[in-house]
Amino acid sequence: MSEQTMPNWLDQRAFLTPERVALVTEDEILTFSELQKRTKEMASRLSSLGIQKDEHIAVYAKSSVEMVQMIHALSYLGAVGVMLNTRLTIEELVFQVTDSSCAYIIGEDSFKDTLKEIGKQTETPSLSFEELKGYQTVPSSMFEEVIMDAPYTILYTSGTTGSPKGVMLSYSNHWWSAVSSALNLGITEKDQWLAALPLFHVGGLSILMKSVIYGMPVHLHTSFDIEAVHDAIMNKGVTTVSVVSVMLDGLLDRLGSERYPANFRGMLLGGGPAPEVLLHKAAEKSVPVFQTYGMTETASQIVTLSPDYALDKIGSAGKPLFPAQLSIELDGKPTSAHEIGEIVVKGPMVTAGYYRRPETNEDTIQQGWLRTGDLGFKDEDGFLYVVDRRKDLIISGGENIYPAEIEGVLSSLEKVKEVGVVGKEDEKWGSVPVAFIVVREGMALTREDIAAFQKEHLASYKQPKEIYFVNHLPRNATNKLLRRELANWLKQRRNVQ
Ligand code: ATP
Ligand code: MG
């Protein structure tokens, strides 16, 4: 069978709708035709630098027009983009560049020193976008087609449960992600999507793919600024924004008693659990929220809850997108409704595997089904509820305890700013939950207050047996809580008051 191809996405888009807006940034507005022209120029320079088909190129930049060009330029060369998180430490960056066998590291001018340092430590040529401009635009052959099964990007998982793994996503994965999302949300001529999530994260990168596939303008924000996002929705025609819960919370506070314009379609909320209070708050302000469940391995969302069900099915992440399937499994068998097991998913947006991790691939992907490592259940109507990470489950005297549930309850205490729960070894019970709490500034909270509150809201076996007050919680570069680091804190009794 011959391999499936498509016209290069940016070429095709620039051919079909050249004058449509592709990108809106603080400084400029670019049409698809303009973006294509600049991208081809960059691709040509990359080619004269020596970049070849199938080579892995690390990209180290915050969201910018150049970063967008870079991603599309790689498609003209048939090279694979390894998107580095700009918040990683040098050590973490070195690991990812080495692990993914990069041939070059290219990045933002302001990161010149870091680029040099990673280059030195990994013995990989590195250069900034500015330095790239020193290379000539030579007439070079560019691929006019993309091969659907070929890898396009490698994105590392956040490293919340272990060391980050390089997820290979093909053109086909990205295509189906964009198409599945459109089948779910629909597309209108008026749609404009705001990307404040970084492009090195799958939540941001998927917006860029949608832009070129749908022919839709993307408002590209370098960082999340509540005021700028609010203004873009109120005054600049943005209809959809991808957010994580802390962003949504900030935006709702900023909205106050105002209302978003009628053409605003909604917030695509993902990345982690959504607190119920937040969903009620959004409903009160008539802000439609599409709750989603997904991960790097599924090229962003794979399960989504439409706003019509936001309150009826509160806390649910919804149903699988049209081409996807969802199963909850316990001991290799599907569970019945409301029974908790591992979330297993299948669909054309699911990765073929992690780069250079044959054993993990064998364990996690079987006949196209991906074992997510997350626990959840389906209700009688097939709606998914995500419970927690499998690795973080606490088994206490034979009872299963989910740290996320306890965190959810304790964080509803007004004086609690952040909370993290882990299991601690216990002679009698095997393991017991303990909580780390960051108290809101200027507020006083005692262990007795917490004990009284949890007595009312949590079964006794779920009540944390020890409470530690701390100044901060350990988080990774995606701002996710690192419970394994909390477990280390316990062992070392460091940072613990
Ligand atoms: P690693 O795989 O390296 O441990 P990670 O899983 O945090 O890191 P990502 O791919 O960025 O890396 O995150 C995906 C994970 O985020 C999911 O597997 C899930 O645990 C969590 N998540 C995503 N959406 C939701 C949701 N709606 N509710 C609860 N958790 C969610
Ligand atoms: Mg993961």
Image: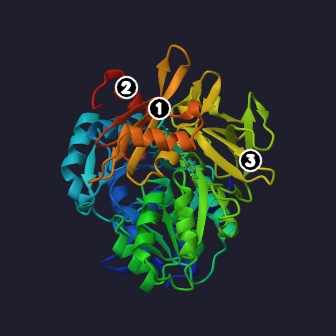
Residue 355 visible in the current orientation: yes
Q: Earlier in the sequence, mark 2 or mark 1?
A: 1
Disc 2, disc 1: CB below 8 Å? yes
Farthest-out residue, top: 427
Disc 3, disc 2: CB below 8 Å? no
Q: Nearer the viewer, residue 118 or 286?
A: 286
Corner quadrant of residue 393: top right
Label of residue 490 in the image: 2
Q: Is mark 1 within 8 Å of ligand 1?
A: no
Residue 121 is situated, as x and y percent measured from the top left of the image, at 25, 35
Which one is closest to the eye, mark 1 or mark 3? 1
- From mark 2 to mark 1, how far is it between C-alphas? 9 Å
From the image, tell me which residue sits under label 3.
378
Name which residue type carries label 2: Leu
Q: Number of numbered discs present?
A: 3
Name which residue type carries label 3: Lys
Label of residue 422 in the image: 1
Disc 1, disc 3: CB below 8 Å? no
- From mark 1 to mark 3, how far is it between C-alphas? 25 Å
Is 367 above or below relative to 111?
above
Q: Residue at x 33, y 47 (%)?
A: 439
Q: Secondary structure at mark 2?
A: helix
Residue 70 is situated, as x and y percent measured from the top left of the image, at 39, 60
